[in-house]
Image: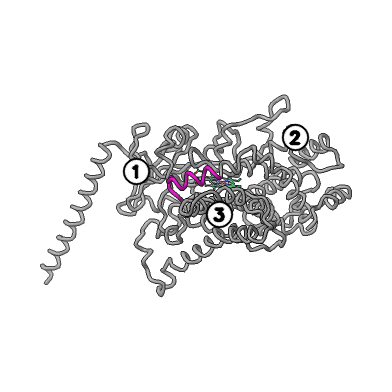
């Protein structure tokens, strides 16, 4: 008996080693002998699984890049993940070779959620191209100029909510960004502070940001785990997928059903949905259905991507003021000199408010809300700097590394709006900052809206409120931890937001929009 079992063990070893050798030779031939980009040494089978932390992975990638160079590769269960840590590598690949790096990687959990309808998850297909066209048109700078009165009104509503209930500042910021998108995209006015539509998009983005990073969920690395049946409750991914599916469908169809209802009863408000649906009127049936699908997908995608991102950035602005209160004093001096105390700021003031503008820029640099952007995937084998990048590789932009480069930005971890002010007091434009919105064909279509929202919210808050430290954060003053997820937001904290004086309070009340 022992002889037989020894033989079979040897047999298995021979079969496994031969298979591994076969895979290694096939891989070598495919690479034509070229190496993968450098990185930490992978373990057999699991590869670098344990080298990729579930949170704050951008910091680990940055450390690895100091040892191995700006283009890294990691291997997890045979999947190749390439991380680009410099502006040059991102521009060379994602922009100059944008036709190769325009797909999105496959995430089994998102397939289980049937989430491919979302533009951010979709490959660069014809339907995606049409959705992008619609979004690029709907959120282009000229369109943003037309939305300025809406943005200003929403900022005034933010101020009056802050005055009434300052402790709920996070909810008010989500309300601002969510209600803006719902109004622009669907003509839907959010009246209730607990509106489910705002919560649904925020919850969806938070879920996606938690489960969509490499190494964050085992089913993404071992797709067969998706078949674990539901009765093995704590091992099965099916309940999570169903929760994500339901949330996704609510975000995709809820507001569009609202628009269709208002068209039928004649109360539809101007919106990107209405404008595009009207254009489909002349189309015949199959084309019309396809066009409606493009509109639904495109707008569902901005609704899910545009709320939590901008709100989290404005939360980081509050954290920055708590850490460097003197910045608030300088900004308020500038606001008082340019605008006075008799009115609230508007977009026409922006060119004369370089310091406030520098604060907005520094927030995006200091705490980029999507430090790793969203992964691209390559559509064919490629070679860069002599390294082999296989078709289907995950390609990740380490936006954090670019915006924390100490040569470009000395003392990168310190919040310093001054770095964007020229010696003559004017604003220093910095094209590198655009990296916070990604690269190439998949660059964020909402970047102009995000920029305008941040300016109007930050300038309005500074003009009438004093933001100061609250009690403490978990007993540790001056510590403002972040989630470390794909959307990197501050963890809940307290602070005091009070009107600067009686005049400020009157201004807020006088400008509060009617509910
Ligand atoms: C501070 C705010 C924001 C930041 C930092 C941000 C950043 C990003 C980044 C890094 C990407 C991935 C780009 C790439 O793949 O290279 C992205 C994609 C996207 N963003 Fe934003 N974003 C913000 C706000 C918004 C807003 C307000 C909207 C909606 C109006 C929006 C809609 C989208 C969509 C739909 C995509 C997917 C694009 C695609 O896959 O083709 N984002 N964003």
Q: Is residue 68 magenta?
A: no
Instruction: Describe the element under mark 1 as helix, strand or loop.
Output: loop
> x, y (%) of residue 210?
51, 56
Q: Residue furthest right?
A: 502
> x, y (%) of residue 306?
60, 50
> Closer to the observer: label 3 or label 2?
3
Residue placed most toward the observer, 512 or 212: 512
Mark 2 residue's CB less than 8 Å from ligand 1: no
Q: Which residues are magenta?
A: 122-134
Q: Mark 3, residues whose alpha carbon is within 10 Å: few (<14), some, or many (≥20)?
A: many
Q: What residue is rendered at 47% in x and 51% in y?
A: 287
The residues bearing labels 1 and 2 have C-alpha atoms spaced at a distance of 47 Å
Q: Which residue is mark 3?
A: 300
Q: Which residue is mark 1?
A: 391
Q: Note whether residue 85 is visible.
A: yes
Q: Note whether residue 54 is visible.
A: no
Residue contact at pointers 3 and 2, CB within 8 angstroms: no
The residues bearing labels 1 and 3 have C-alpha atoms spaced at a distance of 29 Å
| Image quadrant where one finds the C terminus | bottom right
Q: What residue is rendered at 30% in x and 52% in y?
A: 44
Instruction: Describe the element under mark 3 as helix, strand or loop.
Output: helix
Q: Sequence order check: which comes first, mark 3 or mark 2?
A: 3
> Closer to the observer: label 1 or label 3?
3
Q: Which residue is mark 2?
A: 353
Instruction: Describe the element under mark 2 as helix, strand or loop.
Output: loop
């Amino acid at each position: 008996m022992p002889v037989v079992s020894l033989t079979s063990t040897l047999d298995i070893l021979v079969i496994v080693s031969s298979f591994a050798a076969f895979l290694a030779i096939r891989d070598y031939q495919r690479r034509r002998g070229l190496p993968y980009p450098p990185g930490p040494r992978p373990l057999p089978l699991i590869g670098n699984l344990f080298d990729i932390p579930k949170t704050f992975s951008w910091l680990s990638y940055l450390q690895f890049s100091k040892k191995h160079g700006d283009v890294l590769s990691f291997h997890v269960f045979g999947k190749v993940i390439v991380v680009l840590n410099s502006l040059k590598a991102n521009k060379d690949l994602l922009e100059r070779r944008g036709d190769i790096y325009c797909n999105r990687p496959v995430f089994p959990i998102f397939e289980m959620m049937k989430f491919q309808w979302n533009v951010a998850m979709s490959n660069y297909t014809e339907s995606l191209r049409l959705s992008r066209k619609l979004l690029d048109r709907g959120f282009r700078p000229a369109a943003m100029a037309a939305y300025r009165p809406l943005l200003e009104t929403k900022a005034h509503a933010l101020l009056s909510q802050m005055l009434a209930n300052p402790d709920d500042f996070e909810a008010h910021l989500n309300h601002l960004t969510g209600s803006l998108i719902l109004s622009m995209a669907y003509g839907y006015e959010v009246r209730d502070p607990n509106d489910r539509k705002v919560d649904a998009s925020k919850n969806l983005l938070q879920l996606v940001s938690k489960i969509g990073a490499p190494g964050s969920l085992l089913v993404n690395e071992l797709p067969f785990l998706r078949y674990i049946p539901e009765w093995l409750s704590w091992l099965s991914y099916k309940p999570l997928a169903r929760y994500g599916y339901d949330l996704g469908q609510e975000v995709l169809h809820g507001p569009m059903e609202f628009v269709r209802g208002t068209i039928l009863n004649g109360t539809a408000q101007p919106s990107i949905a209405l404008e595009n649906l009207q254009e489909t009127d002349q189309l015949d049936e199959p084309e019309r259905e396809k066009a409606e699908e493009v509109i639904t997908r495109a707008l569902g995608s901005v609704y899910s991507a545009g709320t939590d991102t901008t709100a989290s950035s404005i939360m980081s602005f509050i954290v920055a003021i708590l850490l460097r209160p003197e910045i608030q004093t300088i900004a308020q001096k500038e606001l008082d000199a340019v605008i006075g105390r008799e009115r609230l700021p508007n977009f026409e003031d922006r060119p004369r408010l370089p310091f406030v503008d520098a604060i907005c820029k520094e927030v995006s640099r200091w705490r980029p809300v999507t430090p790793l952007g969203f992964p691209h995937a390559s559509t064919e084998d490629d070679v860069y700097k002599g390294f082999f990048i296989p078709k289907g590789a995950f390609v990740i932009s380490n936006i954090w590394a670019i915006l924390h480069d100490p040569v470009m930005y000395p003392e990168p971890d310190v919040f310093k709006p001054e770095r964007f002010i020229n010696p003559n007091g004017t604003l220093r434009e910095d094209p590198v900052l655009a990296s916070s919105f990604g690269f190439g064909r998949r660059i964020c279509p909402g970047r102009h809206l995000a920029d305008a929202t941040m300016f109007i919210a930050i300038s309005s808050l500074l003009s009438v409120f004093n933001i100061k430290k609250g009690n403490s954060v978990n007993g540790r003053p001056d510590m403002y931890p972040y989630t470390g997820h794909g959307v990197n937001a501050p963890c809940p904290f307290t602070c005091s937001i009070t009107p600067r004086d009686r005049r400020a309070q009157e201004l807020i009340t006088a400008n509060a929009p009617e509910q």
